[in-house]
Amino acid sequence: MSEYKDFSICKDTQLTLKKAHEDGVETVWDRFKKQKPRCKYCKAGVSCQICVMGPCRIDPSGKSKSKLYGVCGANADIIVARNLARMIAAGAASHSDHGRDLIEILYKIGKGMAPGYAIKDTVKLKRIAKEYDIDTKNIGNEEIAIRLSKAMMKDFSMEKGRLTFIDRAPKQRLELWEKLDVIPRGIDRETSETMHRTHMGVDNNHMSILLHAVRNSLADGYGGSMISTELSDIIFGTPKPGFSEVNLGVLKEDHVNILVHGHNPAVSEMIGQAVEDKKMIQLAKAKGARGVNLAGLCCTGNEILMRKKIPLAGNHLMTELSMVTGVVESIIVDYQCIMPSLGQVAQCYHTRLYSTSNKAKFPFIEHVEFTPENAKEQAFKIVKESIENYTRRNKDRIFIPASPVKNMTGFSVEAILEILGGSLNPLIDAIKAGKIKGVVGVVGCNNPKIKQDYGHVELIKRLIANDILVLTTGCANVAAGKAGLQMPEAKELAGPGLKEVCGLLNIPPSLHVGSCVDNSRIIVIACALANAIGVDIDKLPIAGAAPEWYSEKALTIAFYVMASGIYTVLGVMPPIGGSKKVTELATSGLKDIFGACLAVEPDPIKAAKLITAHIVEKRKGLGLSV
Ligand code: XCC
Ligand code: SF4
């Protein structure tokens, strides 16, 4: 058992991983080990495969004089900057494509072509439409939906020339971005231009590649991701606080268990509707189960947890293990962060797997395509088949490793404002009085390079103990929930000031604000705080951290957060070490440009010190007590 403690701090992970090995199942950790030793060129970002004169490699130590340039003459700085920019483009493309799919649904709702979907938050629909200069008087919600979706489509193209939501940023930040020429002109345009710039023989100045990468990342943060969040709220409802449960213990032995995994709530929300249907529940009972239990994984799990309080079974590194419990009838995936190994693991159990997006297909996973038109029908089909699969369960192989932990969720910006009585002023007063020293977003993934959830949990505990309010998204949120940090009672772990505020408002010291696209909610709060105080964002006592990140999307997030003026600490080094210039820029030089930079610190205890020191410095800058 002790060896399993090296992989994860979570009991449910340790025990289920042990069973996986007993069952002969290979997991992400086993494959991780087999990949060692890692290529030092790739690790440092100095291998290039951009054209077929290569692949080329530059000696990251700089010792080998014959390996200073690729065949085309690109040096380490150019190669590292190009590779980094392409990672950021991929992240931006992923979030933005997610947003685009939601725009299509909104448009089809307006046209009456998306049965099963509806506009849940009409107040927000009108508010966002106003931001897009749409006159909502005398037109129905359907027409507003059509006009808003068309206006948002313009954000994606080159028709408008400037992202709409970018103007949520404080004017000082906008002026800076204008001066640097990094205001995104169109979401797709910036990603496309990154691909162009990084083609052989285009942009060969690491600085200008990086500045464009920043613009590309802003196109995600204030574009694709922000649109995704706002539209999900409009279509599926703006989250409100409430309670649920988290960890593998949310699976129920006597129920049909269905898991949803991925990112876009368009599929999971429909599955959510189908499992509540009386006929489906009757069918489950006829098959000998007590009912149907829906739970989430990763970010689509965060989405339905936020809105419907549907329990969360686990984060990134738990996705394979969920099947090892032997009680999962089906997993329905949409896209992003879905390991292609899932189908293989399912071969050892009775779990049926379904992919739903025509852009995300997997080995050994059955494809049932979802469109706005057929989603309702398909959701019922899959739920019915999942229920029928209950009788195929092998009762001798069942293993539910833990009891669920209660958590509190649903902290949208709107919900936070409501708790505060309608404005951010009480929060600002608490910050000024030093009761809350600062606010930090702890976000991002799991990565087998870091003991699962250790980075998240240690960091959050230390921050809240220092009176720093934590906002979580993505897989970090699951870690916080499992560790009990998302209950109001966790205030006991907070410093005296934060404890008092949490007690007064009856909230946890670590608030769940959503999925990874919902980092845009953190940005909205940061912008609103800066605007209310009348300073730029980089003057605020706030920071970001992604202690266990793995994905290109996380890197894009780190970049738009940094470019917004928020110091961000990464727990895993991005592949940039092969260029001194790029590394220095990212970890210090950008501070002179954006007022914030990145830091890399794998040890969460040291990361907490870095962040706390940063917050102290910012408080001093504002003339606040420390
Ligand atoms: Fe994926 Fe969003 Fe990372 Fe988790 S946190 S591993 S990106 S699911 Ni987004
Ligand atoms: Fe090599 Fe240059 Fe081609 Fe990259 S772009 S593979 S460095 S020749």
Image (cartoon, rainbow, N blue to C red):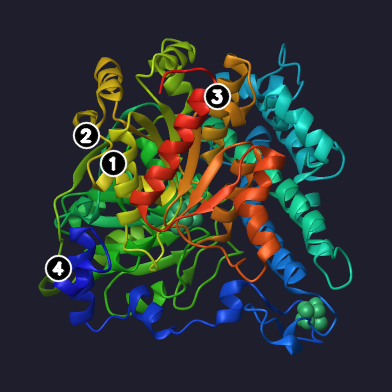
Q: Position of residue 349 (x, y in %)?
A: 26, 75
Q: CA distance from mark 3 to mark 4?
A: 57 Å
Report the disc number at residue 398.
4
Q: Residue at x 81, y 40 (%)?
A: 180
Q: Look at 55% across and 24% down and name the residue there.
A: 621
Please name the residue that numbered disc 2 is placed on.
493
Q: Earlier in the sequence, mark 3 or mark 4?
A: 4
Quick one: label 4, few (<14), some, or many (20+) residues within 10 Å?
A: some
Check disc 1 and report the residue beneath it: 461
Are the residues at dot 3 and dot 2 in contact (C-beta closer than 8 Å)? no
Give 120 or 493, whichever is nearer the viewer.
Answer: 493
Q: Return the mark for residue 173.
A: none
- According to the picture, the residue beneath numbered tag 3 turns out to be 621
Establish if 395 lies above or below 302: below
The mark nearer the N terminus, 3 or 2, is 2
Q: CA distance from mark 1 to mark 3?
A: 26 Å
Q: What amino acid does circle 2 point to?
A: Leu
